Amino acid sequence: MVDHAQNRLSGRTIAAIATPPGRGGVGVVRVSGPRAHAIGLSLSRRTQLHPRYCHFATFRDGHGQALDEGLVIYFPGPHSFTGEDVVEVHGHGGPAVMHGLLQAIFALGAEPAEPGEFTRRAYLNDRMDLSQAEAVAELIEADSASAARAALRSLEGEFGRLVEQLADDLIELRMFVEGALDFPDEDVDFIADGHVLSRLDELLAQLDHLRERASQGVRLGEGFVVVLAGQPNAGKSSLLNRLSGRESAIVTARAGTTRDVLRESVAVAGFPVELVDTAGLRESTDVVEQEGIRRTRDQVARADRIIYLVDAAVGWQPGDESEWAALPADRRLRVWTKADLAAAPAGAVAVSATAAEPGVEPLLAALADELTGAEPGDALGARQRHLDALDRVRDHLNAAAATLRAHGSGDLAAQDLRWGLDALGEITGRVHSDDLLGRIFATFCIGK
């Protein structure tokens, strides 16, 4: 359970600049803790701050020197972001101004906030569960509208509610199993009626659906991995350079120039995409090239989409047929390159990495359709640790089912159900350790 005293007994009032570094029209300094209200009064030289009201003020340091003028807003706890008294100081967004305001606030008794400390206090003060707290960071870091929508669903509590519903159902089943253990003479009957195994199957289906939604959110947050594959000299490196706008890959007429994996980040129809250039696929006796081909196949296995390139001037070769057939049918896209030099088959996606016509627009349009079709409408903002926790829950539920089928006894099954509940609790924070919280909030920006 959450150690609420950990936050409330600290007595620290923290402050940090809450807007990005650099120059802007407006900058915000956030203050949270028991001295926040007094600091707001002193800095603004006001006698009263009305809750949730924008007060115009000239901000002054402890010597009465004017620092800036702007707005000060007071949010009394517990109805604030952190659950504590919070004051936001809105001034002009120049670095010198923001630094001066922050130093004046420190002089009035605040301390520098640690990364993620405002959100951590919101979690510790029951303003949000742990999945919502992490969704704050996901929303800030979102590189696409799809990722932002997924993060917002979790911030609004949908992920946490689904986890808690699964936990409630698991608790109910655990109570049934442990209750049956109190009547050992009826243990065989309780297993034989199939109720427990049937409910376990239902919970596993429920869990798999939740994990799929979370997995989609992780992919949206991290971006799609798109691998450029094909035979040597098919134009992979030239296409990577054209799409990224950088000469990151060496391009020569010699086949097999690319020996290692090259990556570039691009945006396609608002989706973050990691483009991966790989070694050409062919039989080779060269040890270095063989290693490059092995790495290519490894990248292909992990890719969200594989663009298989075919040189239009050379045409479709027997080697292309075998390589194409080996690719996952739901993740492959065939593209003809060097279309300015030779005609591609009718209706094919054809591109030129060097000429204006047809250029790369046909590929971008086709890839946009692929990614839009893959965009889940109900993805949940999530992180890899959530997927790991859900995988452990599945392992425990499967172990419980296997024990019941093999031995017909609920003792070991009940223990696996307890462990499954603990793994679920790590997602929302029902079960946590200080080390876990430290790792999570260390990834947040200061000021959030």
Image: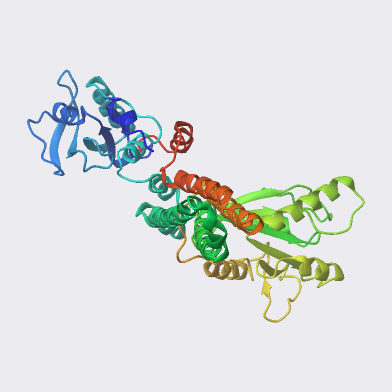
Q: Percent position (x, y) of residue 22?
A: 38, 37
Horizontally, is 276 left or right of 233 in the view?
left
Q: Is residue 91 above or below residue 378?
A: above
Residue 247 in sight here: no
Image quadrant containing the C terminus: top left
Which of these two is toward me, 263 or 187?
A: 187
Q: Residue furthest left?
A: 47
User: Which color scheme did the rendering employ for the protein?
Assistant: rainbow
Q: Residue furthest top?
A: 63
Q: Residue at x 69, y 48 (%)?
A: 262
Q: Percent position (x, y) of residue 292?
A: 80, 49
Q: Residue at x 49, y 65 (%)?
A: 376
Q: Residue at x 44, y 31 (%)?
A: 434
Q: Is residue 54 above or below residue 239?
A: above
Which of these two is toward me, 263 or 244?
A: 263
Q: Is residue 39 above or below residue 264?
A: above
Tell me which corner region of the image, top left, top right, bottom left or bottom right, holds residue 309.
bottom right
Which of these two is toward me, 102 or 110?
A: 110
Q: Percent position (x, y) of residue 253?
A: 81, 56
Q: How many marks?
A: 0
Residue 161 in sight here: yes
Horizontally, is 284 left or right of 209 in the view?
right
Which of these two is toward me, 84 or 433?
A: 433
Image quadrant containing the N terminus: top left
Q: Residue furthest right?
A: 285
Q: Percent position (x, y) of residue 265?
A: 58, 51
Q: Residue furthest front?
A: 185
Tell me which corner region of the image, top left, top right, bottom left or bottom right, holds residue 306.
bottom right
